[in-house]
Image (cartoon, rainbow, N blue to C red):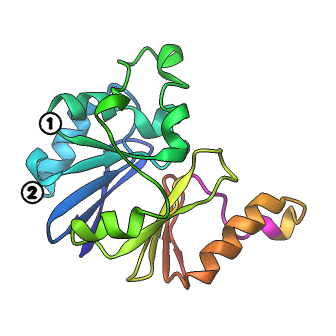
Amino acid sequence: METVVLRYGNTNTYLINGSSGGILVDTDMPGTIGAFFKEIKRHGIRIKDISFVMATHYHPDHMGLISELMDMGVRLLLVDIQNSHIHDWEAKIGSKPIDGESARIISIDESRSFLGELGIHGEMIHIPSHSEDSVGIMLDDGTLIAGDLSPISYLQSEPEVSQLRDDWNLILDHHPKLVLFAHSNQLVF
Ligand SMILES: [Zn+2]
């Protein structure tokens, strides 16, 4: 299993490669498809290597390419708690509506067995401090893809942010070694 970081704008996109399929986590803003293709080509990745695309949460800088990738045959992976949020920003940013009907929808509890089908060892966790629909992907190798979660250092300056504390406590229970964020530097434990 390996996680590849793709950079073609302001959002880090991660491709988790399992033995039976890959999941692309987060995409940049709408309009970045050209830059995305350049970047995957640079890494020797083809669209058919990507079985599913998902967003850690449905803000514009994370869901921007989902509809276009779905048109190319990439399936949407949706955690059930995200389902009511997939259209939150589409009208405001003028992007094509995401076809949620065709998505594979899983619960947090089902995530480990689902990932296992792709040969990916890990599970999803619900970390709603950034937004209600935010999920993280916690891999058994100790890598966490955390989306827009605020760094743990924020807890020192803002100790009253209790949801952020709850999120980090949940993460620490999983003994992470490396936390990958969508916009900031990675955190090594
Ligand atoms: Zn973001």
Work out whether residue 43 or residue 114 is closer to the camera in this orientation and state it.
114
Residue range corresponding to the magenta coloring: 148-155
Work out whether residue 124 or residue 155 is closer to the camera in this orientation and state it.
124
Give how far across and how far down residue 167 sits, in percent: 68, 65
State the residue position of label 1: 73
**On the picture, is 50 further left or further right than 181?**
left
Query: Which residue does the image show at 12% across and 45% down from the upper left?
Result: 47
Quarter of the picture holding the C terminus: bottom right
Give how far across and how far down residue 126 sits, in percent: 58, 59
* Residue 57 appears in the picture as rendered: no
Kind of residue at badge 2: Gly
State the residue position of label 2: 44
Quadrant in which residue 78 is drawn:
top left
Q: Is residue 2 above or below residue 25?
A: below
**On the picture, is 4 further left or further right than 153?**
left
Does dot 2 land on a helix, a strand or a loop? loop
Numbered-mark total: 2
**Disc 1 versus disc 2: nearer the observer:** 1
Give how far across and how far down residue 129 sits, in percent: 70, 53
